Image (cartoon, rainbow, N blue to C red):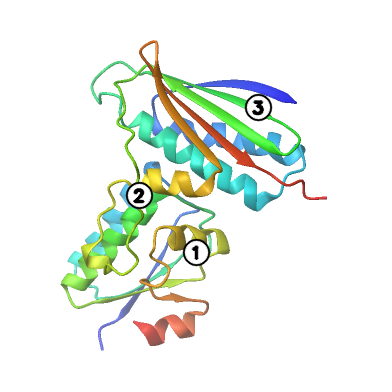
Amino acid sequence: MEERTFTIGSRLAEIEPVQEEIKQILQTAGFRLKQIHAALLALGEWLEHVVQNFPANGSPGIVTIELWVEEAEVRFRVSDDGPELAFSDVARPDAQVPVTQRNIVGLNLHLMHSLVDQVEFHRTDGRNVLELVKQLIPST
Amino acid sequence: MPPIVIVEAPTRLDAYASAEFGSFVVSVINAGATRIIINLSLVGYLGSAGVGSLLLIAKSLTARNGRLALLAARPSVIEVLRICGLAEQFVLVDTIDDARERV
């Protein structure tokens, strides 16, 4: 099992580099690219949600990403010291609603839930904490 | 027939890049374009913010009786649209000739 911890500032520009670093780790571990992409997209959706939750005019916040890579799964724990996040049940988009009437509110959380196998959110010691689990199949 | 405008989407449509991309395409629409093809062939990362930009573009075009086609989307991009319930709503095409016929 491999464990890593990453720390980024609350800026959107800092998300892609950490995703790339994690991608390298998961590719080295031999997982399929399609599943890696899904895991990183779910992580990215939450990181964007967190970063955009910090006050725009405040001092930059700190977001910590812990990674555990096991034989057939990857786990992320993302924690931040930003304002408390709302984490309600996510409504499934209605595919029958025309594009012109679509609302994007909640689409990020819906996407995140759809891409991973397990999502848990809690507020602990004044921090938002999200845990994501994605089952992965080795490519060989 | 009005001219067709082809827009190349960036490799990554996340919250960082998609706002600028969406605003650019909407400015093209506001300048009078009504037939738009967005080439998604380079897009390897489509997040919800990118989906939001595509919706914004589609709504802007619809308001002007325009048409939009999404060209050469990768399977990972189509999968995101499917999860968002939009794969059937957008015009997805594989070739530029098909795109020209659909806009």
- Residue holding disc 1: B78
Residue at the image point whose x is 47% and y is 57% from the top: B80
Q: Secondary structure at mark 1?
A: helix
Image depth: mark 2 or mark 1 in front: 2
Q: Pointer 3: residues within 10 angstroms few (<14), some, or many (20+)? A: some
Q: Is residue A29 above or below residue A9?
A: below
Which residue does the numbered mark 3 point to in the structure image? Answer: A68
Report the amino acid beneath label 1: Ile
Distance of mark 3 from mark 1, alpha carbons?
A: 29 Å
Instruction: Name the residue rendered at 52%, 48% in the picture.
Output: A115
Along the line of sight, which residue is nearer the eye, A33 or B102?
A: A33
Q: Nearer the viewer, residue A47 or A111?
A: A111
- First of labels 2, 3 by sequence position: 3
Q: Is residue A9 above or below residue B55?
A: above
Q: CA distance from mark 2 to mark 3?
A: 26 Å
Q: Is residue B91 visible?
A: yes
Q: Amino acid at mark 3?
A: Trp
> Residue under circle 2?
A107
Check the residue under mark 3 and report the chain it is in.
A
The picture places residue A86, in percent across and down from the top left corner, at 30, 31
